[in-house]
Amino acid sequence: MLKGINPIVSPALLKLLAEMGHGDEIVLSDAHFPGHTFCPKNVLRGDGLQIPDLLEGIIPLFELDCYDDPLIMMAAVEGDELDPQVELDYMAAIRKSAPDAPEVKRIGRFEFYDRAEKAYACVITGTTAKYGNIILKKGVTPLG
């Protein structure tokens, strides 16, 4: 075990986060997301994990991109409704370490799938919230 790293961040996840470069994206998916279909490169299973807990572990280690939208979630399909608590919980977890993080950008379902296909990695979690997927875009670590 390493000091200062939340134990929810497994060695395999830590390796993927370290391998990612500026502009690379990682999907933290809900339990329903077809991660093996849309993220064939690097898929980790985190079936017992919840996305807010993972965000609390990842964000202190991960600089969010400052040029593009670094937080992406899926918009509701016409006729569906979003549970606003999902995004509120995610942002509360993110803002514990990144208080100035921008708001989430919502994109359509198929646009989200296209982004996921290009993502560096996907962690499939045990989160069962509808529209519970989030993409994080890595930025450049500041000097100093």
Image (cartoon, grey):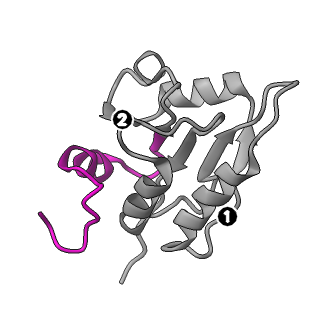
Categorize mark 2 by other alpha carbons within 10 Å: few (<14), some (14-19), many (20+): few
In the rendered image, is residue 7 in sight? Answer: yes
Does the magenta portion include 110?
A: no
Q: Is residue 81 left or right of residue 58?
A: right
Relative to 83, say whether 62 is above or below: below
- Residue at image location 65% in from the left, 35% down from the top: 131
Instruction: Write down the quadrant of residue 40 in the picture.
Output: top left
* Farthest bottom residue in view: 144
Residues rendered magenta in the picture: 1-27
Q: Which mark is residue 47?
A: 2
Q: Residue 87's spot in the image, x, y percent?
A: 67, 52
Quick one: label 1 or label 2, which is nearer the N terminus?
2
Tell me the residue that label 1 is attached to: 102
- As helix, strand or loop, the secondary structure at mark 1 comes to loop
Query: Could you tell me which quadrant the N terminus lies in?
Result: bottom left
Q: How many marks?
A: 2
- As helix, strand or loop, the secondary structure at mark 2 comes to loop
Query: Could you tell me which quadrant the C terminus lies in?
Result: bottom left
Instruction: Write down the quadrant of residue 135 in the picture.
Output: top right
Q: Residue 16's spot in the image, x, y percent?
A: 28, 44
Give amino acid for label 1: Pro
* Farthest top residue in view: 37
* Farthest right residue in view: 79
How many angstroms separate mark 1 from mark 2 (CA)?
A: 28 Å
Relative to 129, say whether 71 is above or below: below
Which is closer to the viewer, label 1 or label 2?
2
Categorize mark 1 by other alpha carbons within 10 Å: few (<14), some (14-19), many (20+): some
In the rendered image, is residue 62 in sight? Answer: no
- Residue at image location 59% in from the left, 76% down from the top: 99
Instruction: Write down the quadrant of residue 37 in the picture.
Output: top left
Viewer-closest of 20 and 87? 87
Does the magenta portion include 2?
A: yes
